[in-house]
Image: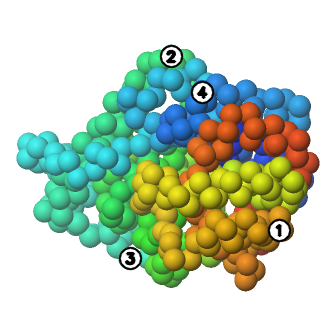
Amino acid sequence: MSLPRFSFGVGDRFAHQAFAQLAAFERLAAAGVIVAPVWNKSNREHTFIGSEPASVRAAAETAVTAGHWPHPWFVDADHIRLQTVDRFVASSDFFTIDVADSIGTPASDADVAAFVARHGELVGTLSLPGCLEPIELDAASLGAIVRQYLLACREAGEIYRHIKGSLGSRPFVTEVSMDETDLPQTPPQLLVILAMLAEERIPLETIAPKFTGRFNKGVDYVGDLAQFEREFADDIAVLAFAAERYGLPRTLKLSVHSGSDKFSLYPIIRRVLAETGAGVHLKTAGTTWLEELIGLSEAGGDGLALVKEIYAYALDHVDELCGPYATVIDIDRSKLPAAAEVSGWSGPRLAAAIRHVPTNTQFNANVRQLLHVSFKVAAKQGTRYTDLLAANREIVAHQVTENIFERHFRPLFLG
């Protein structure tokens, strides 16, 4: 199964916002840009909330059917491993295979030597069309990359074949994710990784490397913008070359994980895509949950009271909530207001602290990140949280749609 040129991941923690999310895609389509929605939810998130993967497909399918959406859409088994994939097979047609934990486990000397011997074309200087600098690898540096990544690529192949065996003739999209690791992959490393994935005969539609800089969840990029632009453009050139050289799908494209709210990167991504004609998959994930909190805050009454309760609980359990996300959040605890202070805020004041508008002096990136990882606190409320979403459907939906369209789609695709 092939992805369209542009695809965009949307998380829906509690399966209540598919209509509001799709409305943003519909507005973008009306403006002349077709982007495929990809609803995603990881095994970790299902476990925290107590939901099942089928709930994601059910919510998405209801929305696209009611809205008569005529374009492609997908349901992503997000960050799956061999141990977790089976529960997603029945309801997913997009599989993000996460092999980051296997990166750095050394391959054997014999396997490294055999790969280097098979791929003499990678030794020397390669001038790739669109790559700002030539890729230079000698046998030793090629071997070092293979030693670091070969077992991760083999694991990706094993998981892919397991999925294919489970789905039979049913088509699906395959992504390989290597972003949740300590060090970024350079363009030469990415080229070698793609050669190894091609040997696994994975019909790769998208790959998620780790880029230089911080990609914290729900807040802007932290890093050197010029360096990111060079890496992004070079990676696109590497993908085009690898697709041609190793028989990977010509639709192969980059996937930007923790890509939500990377406002400073959006003009760069848009410019490079326009210059190259490449596509992109952006996984935005959990910002929808934050928009629900913003909507409930704006609604006042019981909704506002619950958001304040969630914040107070999160503040008392920072280590527990942040631990699983330590590599993708960066919270300055000294800038988290006391629960007593927040309890006195109005709905619009609390909403302004959460809503990602950096020019607003009331915005607090630390509050936003803490609440981003606190969705399981709402899940513990049972139906209280979801009942409030239903009772305040209109105001919550407005926040969800406006966030996706105005703060993400417009700068990425409309300028």
Q: Which residue is disc 3 drawn over?
A: 133
Residue type, label 2: Gly
Comes first in the chain, label 1 or label 3: 3
Query: Mark 4 and 3 residues: CB-CB less than 8 Å, in contact?
Result: no
Question: Label 4, label 3: how many angstroms apart (C-alpha)?
Answer: 46 Å
Q: Which residue is disc 4 drawn over?
A: 52
| In the depicted structure, whether residue 123 falls above or below residue 80 | below
Q: Which residue is disc 2 drawn over?
A: 168
Question: Label 1, label 4: how many angstroms apart (C-alpha)?
Answer: 35 Å
Query: Mark 4 and 2 residues: CB-CB less than 8 Å, in contact?
Result: no
Residue type, label 1: Ser
Q: Position of residue 251 (x, y in %)?
A: 57, 47
Residue type, label 4: Glu
Question: Label 4, label 2: how many angstroms apart (C-alpha)?
Answer: 22 Å
Q: How is the image coloured?
A: rainbow
Other residues around mark 4 within 10 Å, as few (<14) / some (14–19) / many (≥20) = some
Comes first in the chain, label 2 or label 1: 2
Comes first in the chain, label 1 or label 4: 4
Q: Check disc 4 and report its element: helix, strand or loop.
A: loop
Q: Is residue 1 visible?
A: no
Q: Position of residue 268 (x, y in %)?
A: 61, 74
